[in-house]
Image (spheres, rainbow, N blue to C red):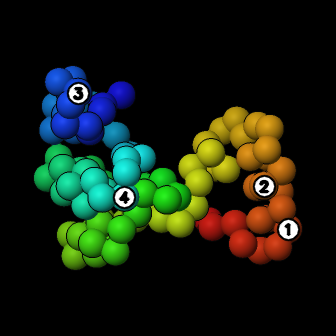
Amino acid sequence: MVYLADADPGPRLGSVKDQVEGVIIAVPRDQSEKAVKEAVEAGMPRVWLQNGCESKAAIALCEESGVPVVHGACVLMYAEPVNSVHAFHRWLWKTLGLLKK
């Protein structure tokens, strides 16, 4: 796990040596562009901007960099196992045809 908060002296995305499929970013909206910039610079192949943290600038940076981005959806409806209220929400969105693929 990598924390992107400036106050945390822990590892940064650039220090990840293992091959990863992508990064989930869940930061305050005003920090999302900076987090995406770090992800792009670290060579992350995909970005998921957790619902509520995305900004137009962060989304645009992904698109301009050719990095596929998911936004406007809660990762807890997709990450297995999906439990509790998230399972109901997932079922409802799937039934209504709103679940992103």
Residue closest to the eye, 30 or 54: 30
Sequence-first disc among 3 and 4: 3
Residue with the mark numbered 1: 95
Instruction: Tell me: residue 3, above or below residue 26.
Output: above
- Three-letter residue code for mark 1: Thr
Residue with the mark numbered 2: 89
Sequence-first disc among 2 and 1: 2
Mark-to-mark CA distance, 2 and 1: 10 Å
Tell me what residue is drawn at x 37 percent, y 58 percent. Answer: 29
- 60 sits left or right of 80 in the view: left
Density class for disc 4 (Cα within 10 Å; few <14, some 14-19, many ≥20) is some
Residue with the mark numbered 4: 29
Residue closest to the eye, 73 or 81: 73
Tell me what residue is drawn at x 34 percent, y 40 percent. Answer: 20
Q: Secondary structure at mark 4?
A: helix
Residue 3 appears at what percent x and percent y? 30, 33
Where residue 5 sits, quadrant-wise, is top left
Where residue 56 sits, quadrant-wise, is bottom left
- Three-letter residue code for mark 3: Asp
User: Which of label 1 and label 3 is nearer to you?
Assistant: 3
Asked if one can make out residue 84 in the rendered structure from this viewpoint, the answer is: yes
Q: Which mark is residue 8?
A: 3
